Image: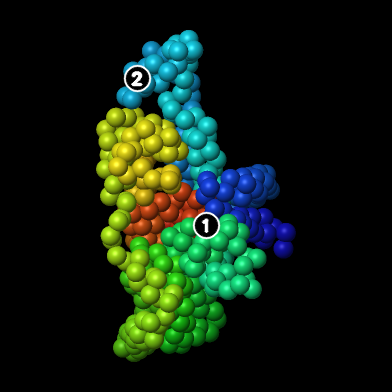
Amino acid sequence: MRAAFRQFGAPAVLLCLAMLLGGGGVQHPAEELLTEALIAVIGCLWFLKADRFGPRGTPRAAWLVAGALLILPIIQLIPLPPGVWHALPGRDLEVQSLSLVGAQNSWRPWSMTPDLTFASLLTMIPAALILLMVSALPRGGRQLAVGVIAAVALAALMVGTAMRTEAGSFLMIYGKSGNDLTGFNANHNSAADVLLIGMIAFAAWFREWNEQRRRPLPAIYGVGMTAGACLMFGVGVVMTASRAGCALLVVAIAACAIIAWPRKGFVVQAAGLGFIGVGVAAVAGFVVFWHNQAMARIISRFHIDHELRPELWKDTLVAIHQYFPFGSGMGSFVPIYMSFERLEIVSMGVANRAHNDYLELTLEAGVFGWLVVAVVVGILSAALVRNFKAPYGGARGHIVFAVSSLMIVALHSVVDYPLRNISLTIVAACCAALLLGLQEQPGSRPR
């Protein structure tokens, strides 16, 4: 039992802690620091105690991806001689400001906000850890990781529903968030992503669990269970009032249909009927709740009047032009953006993000950030192709879950910032690890 915990327990506990406590983002530093400290302890124990499913069993590709995640903020923190950092784009004002106190010739890092870049590095370390841990797991360990994601997402759905009542107000970790369902996240958009990914995780977990049984259940059970999960999680996504989350339901339900679709020995029409039933139930629920006050508020959010995102993007593009191609440093968006924000859109609130992770990455990391993205995507794509050529490399459901979950995060990043909290960063890293570690460990055999 102790050996099993060393192999499977540490990644599962880390994943569970991150999803429960890591959804606050930088607006909740105490919770984020606690999460990072707990993850650091678990990571150290894993490095010291884990045996063949530990660091020695981690694929080389996983080490490369983990290194790519951490290398850029580390480089941005290295002090540079004055002749070098003076030549970086956008440093004129910094040079002039430091010259007032005679510090213009001091050594300064690439990043214009070293403290925020260091904070960004701390949030990337847990993602690198879970990437290394999960990619080293055998098939059973990967199944446990997918099950943890599904279970915590289900818990978030139940807690979020309870929080909407007065009796459940004590469950609000990050304070009141209006009437939106947020679960274990401070942001309703992140909560929607957790539920979408949890929906697919349940479908993948159930299919793998059924395939590993000595006497698998008939395919109709898998279709029915998956359709029920789609309906339950889908209602939760709608109640988050996240517009992008509601739109991405199409991707999540399609992924669940692919996972639940039987390979053989089943009337194909029955599989389609299950998901048609989900659609009919969703339409019926929409009609029933059309005049419901909560539903009316959700529907009203789909109007684009007074939408500020395009204005944020315009000013972010101006800032990008100023600091391109090196960028201003990871985590530096807020202070950099404030110096470029037009007076006509200034309000009492502070733009904490660009609401487009691709623009924000370009501002903070320039072409080097995109180089890292290209390396990571290339490694994951090669792993995906390799696993399609070797079908037993891992469960079909795990592959579809990993790809579709990363697709949801990538699509949502166009209008928001899903990877800017530890919770979703950890989940995305786990999905990447599933692709990198799907090849069975040496000597393992299917049951």
Return the x and y of residue 65 as percentages of the image width and height.
44, 44
- Answer whether residue 431 is visible to the viewer in this image: yes
Label 2 amino acid?
Asp
Please name the residue that numbered disc 1 is placed on.
186
Q: Are marks 2 and 1 in contact (CB under 8 Å)?
A: no
Disc 2/disc 1 C-alpha distance (Å): 37 Å
Which image quadrant is residue 321 in?
top left
Front one among 113 and 194: 113
SS of the residue under disc 1 = loop
The N terminus sits in image quarter: bottom right
The first of marks 2 and 1 along the sequence is 2
Q: Is residue 396 visible?
A: no
Kindly identify which numbered label has been placed on residue 92: 2
Foreground residue among 297 and 206: 297
Count of labels in the image? 2
* Residue located 57% across and 69% down the image: 163
Image-based side of 137 in relation to 67, left or right? right
Residue 16 spot, x, y in % from top left = 60, 60
Whether 220 is drawn above or below 109: the answer is below
Local secondary structure at mark 2: helix
